[in-house]
Amino acid sequence: MTATTAYLHLSEREVVSTGVTAPAQVTALCEEVFHLLARGDYLMGGPHGDSHGLGLDFPESSPFPGMPLAGPDRRFVTMPAYLGGRFDVCGNKWYGSNHANAAAGLPRSVLTLMLNDKSTGEPLCLMSANAISAARTGAVPAVAAQHLAPEARTLAVVGCGVIGRAALVALLHRLPLVREVRFFDVVEAQARNLAHDPALTGTTVVVCTSAAQCVDGADVVSVAASRSHPLHLPAAAFSPTATILLSGPLTGDDDLWRTSTVVLDHVGLHEEYVREASVAPDPERRLSGQIGGPLYRLAARGEVAPLADLTDLPGLVSGSVPMPDDRGRRVVVASGMAVLDVAVGHEAWTRARASGTGTPLDLWG
């Protein structure tokens, strides 16, 4: 092999040092991606180009001693994408997840992102993607809230882990009128810890003893609850004009979906979730693992509008779809897309090259 393929490696510390995970930068990048989604200048996996990714799920039992077995949050997922516009690059986020990682001092999910030349397939940059994934997950609800509830003054944060914190700082950046922030987590120490975040300077902070107390009367509710601690809140728990941002699962009553205006992060993504579930060995189990699972079931029964008729963030951000004209409750469902990781990763790579950050590697040696 005579060719030379130089590429860059970025550690998590180096990724963060580029500034791409800061609230102002990552929310702007997410908005840029929504514009590209509205134009159709992207591809994700699957036959329709809208798949979240391909998962490797482990069996409950196996005759093979080395075979990993199913467990809480235990899976591997690959999330490929092409993103156009100024990015014009392919990439793939690959992660393994296991709830038991905490015992080893590791995050639940360990993520990497590879950027590749769109023509040759050569690697451009391999980087840690934990900070990228958390930041973009928190940025999406903040972009939604700015469009749907720009005058919000009370923010409720349910789920105070890594994603809850990322959503908090992004929301405070995009909602400058917020004056009161409430916190709830099943682990009270996590709520109290997040309540001391420097981003909260100038706000009134309340740590609540229940999720219902936290969301009562709040203008905006950010939900980043863990699948290992299911959250149940009926429609009546929320203000009739609340904007509810789901970055994690919420089991509400059917009225929550029937009586709210639902906004999706990307309609095509959720349609693909339903198509993939329909051919899975256990469709009901597959749907139950999705944030939008309760909505999908109601749509299939004709009790709410079809997914194709719902508003999504690409339409709102690009202005191609009008803002909902009601002043009632809104529910935003955001499930994560590889195009967001690729955008933030591309910006990190671009900045790292400009500053000489990272470790150069050669593919062929």
Image (spheres, rainbow, N blue to C red):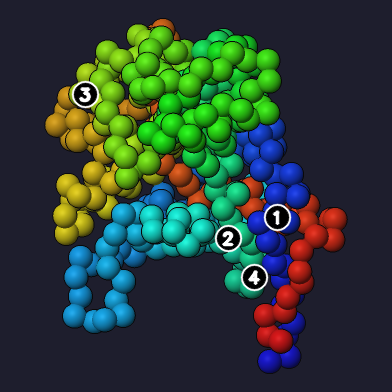
Mark 1 closeness class: few <14, some 14–19, many ≥20 residues within 10 Å: few
Q: Please tell me the numbered disc located at residue 247.
A: none
Q: Please tell me the numbered disc located at residue 253.
A: 3
| Picture residue at 27% right of the left edge, 17% below the top | 235
From the viewer's perspective, is 179 left or right of 285? right
The reply to whether residue 297 is in sight is: yes
Element under label 3? loop
Q: How much space separates mark 3 and mark 2, taking CA atoms? A: 37 Å
Foreground tag (4 vs 3):
3
Q: Label 4, on which residue?
A: 123
Q: Quadrant of the C terminus?
A: bottom right
Q: Quadrant of the N terminus?
A: bottom right
Q: Label 2, on which residue?
A: 113
Q: How much space separates mark 4 and mark 2, taking CA atoms? A: 11 Å
The reply to whether residue 90 is in sight is: no
- Compare residues 278 and 160 and report the one nearer the observer: 160
- Mark nearer the N terminus (3 vs 2): 2
Q: Quadrant of residue 282?
A: bottom left
Q: Label 1, on which residue?
A: 13
- Mark nearer the N terminus (4 vs 3): 4
Q: How much space separates mark 4 and mark 1, taking CA atoms? A: 21 Å
Element under label 1? helix
| Picture residue at 56% right of the left edge, 26% below the top | 195
- Mark nearer the N terminus (4 vs 2): 2
